[in-house]
Structures are given as C-alpha cells and as structure tokens.
Amino acid sequence: MIRDFRQMSWPDVEEALKLKRPAILPLGAVEQHGAHLPLTVDADLAEGVARALAKRTDGLLLPVCSYGETWSSEAFAGTLSISPETLRAMIEDIGRGLIQMGVPALITLNGHFGNNGPIGLAARTLQAEGLPILHLDYPDLEALAGRICTSEPAGPSFFHADEVETSMMMALRPEAVDLTRAQAEYPEFPQTFGYEQFQLRDISKSGVFGDPRMSTAEKGEQLISGIVDAAAPLVDAFLARHGLSAQDSDQGEDHD
C-alpha cells in the first residue's frame, strides 16, 4: 500500500487523513555523481527508499524535494545548490501545511548529507509548533554496504557515486545508469577533511569516491530492503512515543 501525493486527488488525501498516518518527505539534491550517473541521484534514491518505507509503514508519501544544499559540488557542471536558509524555510513551510492539514507526524528521509543541518533546525521549529519529526538518513547503510558490496568505500560512511549509490540506482532507475562510463577513484582526503570546508573537485577529478564498476541491481535491491528493515522499527518506536499506532496497511485505496 502506497498513498502517493503525486497520484492522489484532494478527496483522496482528505480520506487518507482520517487514518492518522505520518507523512514521509524525501529530500535530495541536484549534484554531480560522476560520468555514469545523473545529477538527480540523491533525489532519486531518497524517493525510492521513501516509497519502500511508505509501503512498509502505511505513510503518506510526499513529492520529493529535489533541490538541496550542495555547495561542495558547485565546481562541477550541473550542480545546483540552494542555501541552507532556503531549504530550512521550505521544510518549515511544508511542515506548517501538514499541521494545517491535520497530519499527526512527519518523517524526513534524506538522501544528501548537506541537507542534515537545515533539516535539523527545521525539525526543532516544527516540533515546537506541534509537529513531531523523525529524521532518517539511510539507517544501517555502512553495515549493509560492508555485507553486500564488493569494493572498499572511499572513506568511513562516505558513499558517493560508488558501488552503493550506483547499485541502488540500478535497482530504481536502471535506464539512467551507464556503467560503460564508470571509473574508480579513491581520492586522498586531506587530514582536515570534515574539519574545514572543501570543494569536492579539489579532491576528486571524476566526482567518484570509490569503485562503481561492480554495481548490480540485485545489490541495490538488497541495500534498499536492508535500509527499510532498519528504518521500520525506528518509525514504529517514533509513532508509539507520540501516541500513534503502527502501520494499518489494510485500510484505504492503493494509489501506487
């Protein structure tokens, strides 16, 4: 069961609101991901994982926020970054619309690291205004990648245009992946990486961090399934903490 705002009319939403389910907001970015992947990877993956999570938890799937804060990749053609203030304001405006609509809770599903700060600040504001928010990235991804993927990551918890993201894209949007253009690159991270701001093009010539050449759709499906398996109990605990029930997937119409 997926209640997808992109497929629903206002009467459909009005009926779905009676079930008191959380809304799920995927967030991504328009950012380079090497020569073998499109610029929309972060948004595509966030939407795909959010869709699977909405099906598992019976949540209301909101349209993906495709633009994010991606200053660090602006030196690559095609990257389009919005300011942290703009992203925070957008999330807060969406949240206030959900409050007005009667949605009892919001789950943010983030596919781009640079969005975390604005999401966290928006969550504080909205929670103070009465909307509980659970913020998820991709739970358990590092452990899943270690079990499922063949190549070594470029760095701890650093997955960018590598086997992880490429495999997930092959599972979700295989037509957008061109493995003939894939190349491996393991950039040497400066000692102060993570402690000062860097343009990624100063570190990686290709925009790839790792080795995407061994990617497969099967690995991507396993990664997505594992992420949802790790996220589902967090959602249940979040809903229970705020007096909301766990999934109720037998009600309503399927708008997938």
Image (spheres, rainbow, N blue to C red):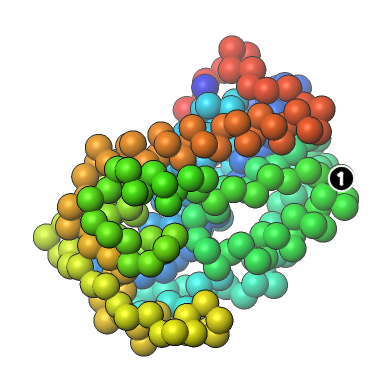
Query: Disc 1 marks which residue?
Result: 130
Q: Is residue 142 visible?
A: yes
Residue located farthest toward the right when viewing the structure as drawn: 129
Residue located farthest toward the left when viewing the structure as drawn: 180
Q: Kindly identify the residue that appears in the image at 29 percent across and 69 percent down.
A: 208
Q: Kindly identify the residue that appears in the image at 58 percent across and 64 percent down.
A: 115
Residue located farthest toward the top when viewing the structure as drawn: 250
Q: Total number of numbered labels?
A: 1
SS type, badge 1: loop
Residue 106 quadrant: top right
Q: Kindly identify the residue that appears in the image at 33 percent across and 67 percent down.
A: 154
Q: Amino acid at mark 1?
A: Gly
Position of residue 75 measured from the top left corner of the image (x, y, whole percent): 40, 84
Determine whether, in the image, residue 24 is placed left or right of residue 85: left
Position of residue 7 measured from the top left corner of the image (x, y, whole percent): 52, 33
Is residue 120 shown above or below 9?
below
Position of residue 221 measured from the top left corner of the image (x, y, whole percent): 32, 37
Determine whether, in the image, residue 25 is placed left or right of residue 156: right
Q: Is residue 2 visible?
A: no
Determine whether, in the image, residue 148 is placed left or right of residue 60: left
Is residue 199 shown above or below 251?
below
Determine whether, in the image, residue 102 is placed left or right of residue 90: right
Q: Kindly identify the residue that appears in the image at 65 percent across and 49 percent down.
A: 135
Is residue 17 shown above or below 68?
above
Q: Residues within 10 Å of mark 1 (few under 14, many from 20)?
A: few
Position of residue 67 measured from the top left corner of the image (x, y, whole percent): 53, 63
Residue 30 quadrant: bottom left
Between 195 and 225, the one lying in front of the other is 195
